[in-house]
Image (cartoon, coloured by chain):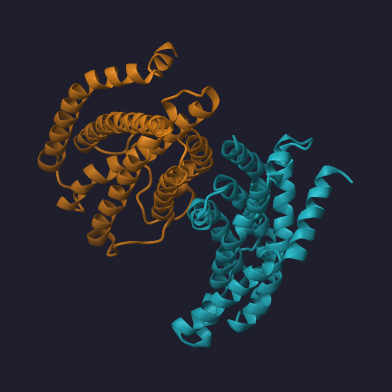
Chain colours: A cyan, B orange
Amino acid sequence: MGCFAAIVRRDLLLALRQGGGGGLGVAFFLIIVTLVPLGIGPDLKLLGRIAPGLLWVALLLATLLTLDRMFHADFEDGTLDLMVIGPLALELVVVAKALAHWITTGLVLVVAAPGLGLLLNLDEGAFVPVFATMLVGTPGLNFLGAIGAGLTLGLRRGGLLIGILVLPLFVPTLIFGISAVTAAITGPAPFGPPFMILAALTLGAVALGPFAAAAAIRANLQ
Amino acid sequence: MSTMFGLANPNRFMRFSGAVLPWTGALAVLLLAGGLYWGLAVAPADHQQGETVRIMFVHVPSAWMAMFTYTFIAIASVVSLIWRHSLADVAAKAAAPIGAAFTFLALATGSLWGKPMWGAWWVWDARLTSVLVLFFLYLGYIALWQSIEEPARAGRAAAVLAIVGFVNIPIIKYSVDWWNTLHQPASVARLDGPAIHPSILYPLLTMGIAFTVLFVVLELMAMRAEVLRRRIRTMRLAEAQS
């Protein structure tokens, strides 16, 4: 089995056995979706209007919460040092770990989103666009989040700092995700262009994020 | 290039900046005083906006400096990572609070201008949102510097962050072109040349130069403080070991 596949398999197994961020992320997602209607009142029409934006924001926050576990465990026990000097390029190691992280947290959140949309009286025509935009947007979030995780290696309160560092990077994905969903629900503007830009943002993040994350890891390990 | 590496020696930098500071300080005061007088008292009031247009002479140079400072930090970060220039990450670290202050000043003066002009303290249009994101980038950058103890390691991590965040600068610049925004489109730095009358353009440019000289003064002072801070840290570590 190649190095890349071995790392992905290892991370998936660890997440499965130790409990990855997926459960925690979904729980947090659920908490936010529960708190907001309690905060703004049960008016279904209002909830239905803000549901796509709320789901996206809750997804972002849940992603932020689970980001620091991407490299933390391996940094603590020295595995990351071995990976840096190992046969596989560090950039590819980052891709493997970010991919496994997306499967165990991002994908789980995306699958949970339509169910939570029911709680928020999400428009019927919006379920597919919300699911599609999240499916396409979340890999980009995880790969950009890898940069933040790499920068905050070994910090005790790194979790809070990651949020501040990667939030500016998440903003374009959020803007175009919401733009695509709104176009699909209400009317004349087509769904295609913002969705294409969202896909482009994810592809760019997957292509370039690992380089920045690898540089950040090297900066912190020297 | 030889000048750049000539100043890499901290001692030489301290001597150079100590000699240069009084003169640049005096120049900054002169330009600011002259520019402010020209813009606030002499330049004509606007046909539609009246006297409130004068806030432009503070708002626009602040916004220019906010973006300029981030570009400065990004370039210093590249120099630090590639050439390991010893004062490059000192320069970047020192510039961050200055840039954050310019950004906050741009946002605040913009708000004060927006209330009478647009009727709102804040709107979520592309230009304002992207400048707010720039402010968060500055805060995150400063927070990262503060959270890593060892200066060299902190410098490398912060350099990566600064370079990654640089993508926001073209977004700010072109946001008024790419999206329908409430904010004024580009009137000075355009391919067709400036679209403002000289009687308002010249005081604006003077204020821009004044703010740039101000940045140089503040940056040199902050760099000197950072060099001294690192010396103190080294001395404390040496004392603790002996």
Tell me if A146 is positioned left or right of A19 in this view: left
Vertical relation: A52 (above or below) A163:
below
The answer to which quarter of the image holds residue A22 is bottom right
Work out whether residue A139 or residue A124 is closer to the camera in this orientation and state it.
Answer: A139
Q: Residue furthest top?
A: B2
* Tally of marks: 0
Q: Residue A142 placed where, x, y %?
A: 64, 55
Tell me if B179 is positioned left or right of B135 in this view: right
The answer to which quarter of the image holds residue A81 is top right
The reply to whether residue B45 is visible in this rendering is yes
Residue occupying the point 37% across, 42% down: B186
Vertical relation: A104 (above or below) B11:
below
Q: Residue B109 placed where, x, y %?
A: 25, 52
Q: Residue furthest front?
A: B242
Residue occupying the point 72% across, 50% down: A97
Work out whether residue B102 or residue A28 is closer to the camera in this orientation and state it.
Answer: A28
Work out whether residue B17 or residue B76 is closer to the camera in this orientation and state it.
Answer: B17
Residue occupying the point 44% across, 42% down: B145
The reply to whether residue B189 is visible in this rendering is no
Q: Residue B239 placed where, x, y %?
A: 37, 31
Quadrant position of the C terminus of chain A in the picture: top right
Q: Residue B209 placed where, x, y %?
A: 26, 30
